Amino acid sequence: MPSPSASSVAQAGRIGRRTGYLLLGALVTAFTTVCTLEIMGQVWFQEVRTTGLECRAGLQGLIQALERARENVGSVREAGNESATLARFRDSLEPEWRARGAVSQACKSDHKSSKALQQIERLRYAEEHAVRYEAQNLARLRRRVQELLRELGIPADSHSQQNFR
């Protein structure tokens, strides 16, 4: 027959484990809930500032910002720095794209303008995807060529080494 102290130790161990599991579960649940609420707030309850912006002028501004961003990435893309390319693209979209919620509000009553805004948003994400994809592919190809040059024993000048990084 086990001693009474051994069974009380085992019982205390079970209680401790259960308490630990409950605390861990509560911590994970609280973290998940807070993160979910933050994401939901940003997606469905965006802060829309009224800027007095007209719908068509806002749409035109969004398009001009996309064109500016596309032009601005060219020089960074040549340098081969993927994260800098993407950051420059996103920075070039501002300040017009910060007012996207206001443009959406201004275009709410015009069905054609709302459809145009949806297509402009799709274009923006396609452009960003293209920038990211091109930058990643370019960097991968540059690294591969650099490896092949090394394997062949062909020295690369300092300018091409900078471009291949």
Image (cartoon, rainbow, N blue to C red):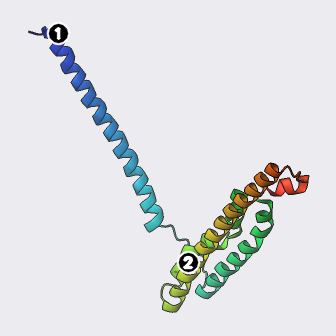
Instruction: Please give the name of the residue rendered at 78% of the width and 69% of the height, measured from the top-left corner.
Output: 74
Q: Decide: marks 2, 1 in contact (CB < 8 A)?
A: no
Residue 42 picture location, percent across and down: 48, 62
Q: Which of 76 and 57 is in front in this view?
A: 76
Say above or below: 60 vs 72.
below
Amino acid type at circle 2 is Arg
Q: In which quarter of the image is residue 86?
A: bottom right
Residue 41 picture location, percent across and down: 44, 61
Amino acid type at circle 1 is Ser
Residue under numbered circle 2: 122
- Report the side of 23 relative to 10 (left or right): right
Instruction: Please give the name of the residue rendered at 70% of the width and 58% of the height, measured from the top-left corner.
Output: 140
Residue 5: mark in rendering: 1
Which quadrant does the N terminus fall into?
A: top left
Say above or below: 10 vs 45.
above
- Report the side of 119 relative to 34 (left or right): right
Instruction: Please give the name of the residue rendered at 77% of the width and 54% of the height, measured from the top-left corner.
Output: 148
Neighbours of disc 1 within 10 Å: few (<14), some (14-19), many (20+): few
- Report the side of 114 relative to 84 (left or right): left
